[in-house]
Image (cartoon, rainbow, N blue to C red):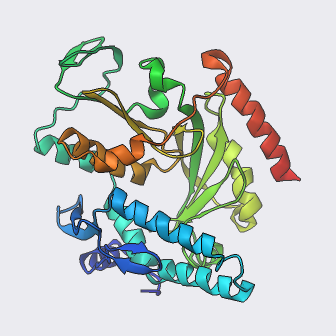
Amino acid sequence: MTELRNSREQWEAMAAELTINGRAFINGEYTDAASGDTFECRSPIDNRVLAQVASCNQADVDQAVANARATFEAGSWSRMAPAARKQVMIKLAGLLLEHKDELALLETLDMGKPIEAEAAAQQGARLFEYSKVNKIQKGDKPKVFTDKGSVTADFLILGGNAYLGDLEPAIGGKVLPAGSYIIATEPLELSVHNSLIPSDYAICDMSVALDYFRLSADKRLLFGGMCNYSGRDPKDIVESMRPKMLKVFPQLKDARIDYQWGGMIGIGANRMPQIGRLEPNIYYAQAYSGHGVNATHTAARVLAEAISGQAQRFDAYAKIRHMTFPGGKTFRSPLLALGMLWYRLKDML
């Protein structure tokens, strides 16, 4: 699967043949979940099952942690020769390389908010777009109020993330909005396209305020970054992002930029998703720190399990402590922006 794939038909044919090893990888080997359970990962295109994935729970996490702790305490890693450590890391990298096409296809197929919204509507969900919630009334049946009406439900999930605002102060201070912006080039000539990322990986750099980039199926380069905590969008995303792109890929100096977009992502102090409960019937999920495309799906499943009475995985997430950012509403973002400026200066040195 290493030759160049150009057409949509070829990618769709690959997707039709896609097979995924959905077992957990613990202690250096593939294994089933301790419970033996799996869950289905379905294609939003035709609803076919893409993979049966091990439904790991706290027992699996405990086992993985126990294995890691035993290895650490035994000293085998610290005493291991550098060449042997290298082989362990190469083995892990090899697993990703071996399945890079499958992983890319799986992520590509298992995403797409409009498709998911349509699927939810087909299952009976009612969607109210452009209806900002102004107030929450807690109780046996939570009620949310908008400018145009109200909605009452048995359970309420707060998923506002970076856009939660002042709606729920108990968790609002634990997530900080941060801008992130992306540009996409025109479809590139084959020679230029192949010179950018020969391995066709998605890449991010090692800076604190990192940049990230990958190639698209139609031969564009997508380049993102410019994380900021001011709460303000740049006047011109292209003007701000192009110099960053050219620093990494100077061969694109004449490439046209066809698309630009961006918005706020929700950042948590420990960069872990925040999943918890405020009331017996009010849950929340937020702070995906730039990984919301995949982490939101996991959070949704964990919350659905908890609401239906299976709280084992939810409890594991809810035990994680999440710091409230200091400074209150007024100084929270400026203080963090000042801290990020310090780290940016260190990145430049």
Task: Relative to 163, say whether 210 is above or below.
Answer: below
| Residue 53: x %, y % from top left | 28, 67
| Residue 12: x %, y % from top left | 29, 73
Q: Give the side of residue 287 with respect to residue 225, left or right.
A: left
| Residue 255: x %, y % from top left | 65, 61
Q: Give the side of residue 133 with respect to residue 173, left or right.
A: left
Nearer to the camera, 185 or 319 = 319
Task: Relative to 195, say whether 133 is above or below.
Answer: above
Q: Quadrant of residue 186?
A: bottom right
Q: Quadrant of the N terminus?
A: bottom left
- The answer to whether residue 201 shows anywhere in this view is no
Q: Give the side of residue 68 with respect to residue 255, left or right.
A: left
Task: Relative to 37, say whether 228 is above or below.
Answer: above
Q: Residue at x 24, y 69 (%)?
A: 50
Q: Quadrant of residue 234?
A: top right
Q: Residue at x 56, y 64 (%)?
A: 214
Q: Residue at x 70, y 61 (%)?
A: 254
Nearer to the camera, 345 or 11 = 345
| Residue 199: x %, y % from top left | 57, 78
Q: Residue at x 33, y 52 (%)?
A: 112
